[in-house]
Amino acid sequence: MVRPGRFFFIVGPSGAGKDTLIDGARLALASRDDIVFATRTITRQSGAPGESHVGVSEAEFDVLEAAQRFLITWRAHGLRYGLPIELKQAVDAGRHVIANGSRAMIAELASRVPELVVIEVTAPVSVLAARIAARGREGEAQIAARLARGLIPVPDGVRALKVMNDASASMGAQRFADVLQAVIDEAPDASLNAGWDDYLAKLGGATLDERAYTRLMDGIAGSRFSDDESRTMLRTLIGTLEDSEVAALARVRMRRMARIDWGEPIVVDKHSMGGVPGSRITLIVVPIVAAFGLLMPKTSSRAITSASGTADAMEALARVDLDATELNAVTREARGCIAWNGRLNHSAVDDVTNAMVRPLQLDTRRWSVASILSKKYSAGATHVVVDLPYGPQTKLANEDEARELGELFERVGAELGMTVKAFATDGSAPVGRGIGPALELRDALAVLDNRADAPADMRDKALRFAAQILAWSPHIGTPHQGRIEAERLLASGAAKQAFERIVDAQGRQPAAQPAALTHTVTAPRAGVVAHIDGWAVSGIARDAGAPACKGAGVDLLCVRGQLVAAGEPVLRIHAAHAEALAAALRALDAQAPVVLAETAGRIDETVISIRY
């Protein structure tokens, strides 16, 4: 038995643009042979301006109506309208009908077709008024009166969806076509799953509220939808997330995780959007802050695609897989921690969505704001500093993008009751010298030990973020004073002592050493280091065995702008074993991790890649 098709009845106020969207959908869905676009019979001349229709006289309309040639008829604006009876036959044969109609006829049509779906095309009042005025048929008073008319509600039991037509005609048509196609192709009884119609509303251009995101996240995390449905839904939600929705989504996520109450007025945290190899400043910032006395329960991730994460680097010296009870005890004892977040701040939504989103390679930056801040909130943070690196190989292409996202972090944080300060930072080159857990830990310890050969860029960046955090203390007040205090705590050794207390509290382990199997890469000729490709270096480090082998990785023996002589070392690979070293060398041969130029001023003209 053929399942009847759906009858889509398109309604909307004057100026909503129903005809435009229907025409656009007709083109967008032209390849589908299971869709019928209805042609109305109207008592006006054929070929008159407006929609394509069958024009008849009043007498001819009477004859057709008496012969029961119409599925429904109605009067509007001095004209009579009819939808042909053949549309019912098309629906019964399993085809789907799209028809422009009158809201007043919804109840009658619902009694005559097996499955009616009402789609209301709408737009803000100001947009409607402007479109009606552009027709030149009515004055301001008539337009105001038209828009002030109350709309007849959709009868109970009739499925109703909306499409917002407030942008370009092409955007409105795309939204309309997307909604039609999603409903036509939806699984049986899909609308009974809480969240599905919210997804359709988002397809139609709606701004979703907290209740809608609650239904959506519950549905996705609870596996109420198929994996394909969930992926499609996430693609739409992530790609069209608005500022207000980021905050709504964050609040939904917050409610799914219990919040830690530290019993202190200021609890600080830090997050980086990542993308800069070697930037392991958390191992310096947390001890500085803990030495000052502010509470900083820092949880971090392991590497996913890079050669090391903060948790990987810390694990080269201390245990990081703390549970909630252990984290609480460590933080209270040492005033801070640097732990892995895999056993903490657990979110079933993340488990499901991350597994689906990562393969889609979507731009998840705005989506991440909700995820990151909800986790910071659940960890008990009251004040959060955010590092937003920008550059050609980071998640943020330029400084403007970073600043824009930073403003969103700060606004959403304020809505959640937290103080958030975001910094756009230059991510065009690695920070520090080592890429790999033990090598990055070595660099951080060099800074904490105030060694003369400590990476200056790592030290400066760590002090910048520590300064902002300390500025939140009423005893400090400004980033300038925070910088002075951070430098004092570092120079005096207080920060290093705080780090050792954190390591002991978490569980000290034998320090991982850089792997002894090495290969040094030298400059093939003299030149200026024009560029260091951080991700190429990171990829070589991974091939060498990082982060699984804590001692594997790459040492950068040069910095951007440095003049190097022919034969001077520029990279040193530390490999887990011979096979890993061979893989790292193959990766080196396929890429240009360091680029030399003949002179600093003519980089683009005489580039020489180091390749082996």
Image: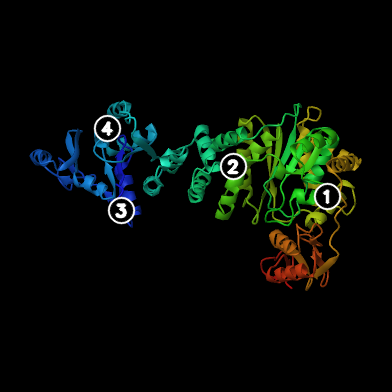
Q: CA distance from mark 4 to mark 1?
A: 71 Å
Q: Amino acid at mark 3?
A: Asp
Q: Earlier in the sequence, mark 3 or mark 2?
A: 3
Q: CA distance from mark 1 to mark 3?
A: 64 Å
Q: Nearer the viewer, mark 4 or mark 1?
A: 4
Could you tell me which secondary element the residue under label 3 belongs to? loop
Left or right, residue 232 beside residue 484: left
Q: Amino acid at mark 4?
A: Ala
- Neighbours of disc 2 within 10 Å: few (<14), some (14-19), many (20+): some
Q: Position of residue 496 (x, y in %)?
A: 88, 43
- Neighbours of disc 3 within 10 Å: few (<14), some (14-19), many (20+): some
Q: Is residue 420 visible from the viewing direction of this image?
A: no
Residue carrying label 3: 34
**227 or 175, which lies in front?**
227
Left or right, residue 223 beside residue 539: left
Q: Earlier in the sequence, mark 2 or mark 4?
A: 4
Could you tell me which secondary element the residue under label 2 belongs to? helix
Quadrant for the C terminus, please: bottom right
Q: What residue appears at the point 8 percent right and 40 percent down from the top-left corner?
A: 63
Q: CA distance from mark 3 to mark 2?
A: 36 Å
Q: Considering only vertical position in the picture, is 128 above or below 444?
A: above
Could you tell me which secondary element the residue under label 4 belongs to? helix
Q: Which mark, by number, is residue 444? A: 1
Residue carrying label 4: 107
Q: Nearer the viewer, mark 1 or mark 2?
A: 2
Q: What residue appears at the point 62 percent right and 50 percent down from the top-left corner?
A: 396
Q: How is the image coloured?
A: rainbow
Q: Earlier in the sequence, mark 1 or mark 3?
A: 3
Q: CA distance from mark 2 to mark 4?
A: 40 Å
- Neighbours of disc 4 within 10 Å: few (<14), some (14-19), many (20+): some
Q: Which mark, by number, is residue 349? A: 2
Q: Position of residue 398 (x, y in %)?
A: 62, 51
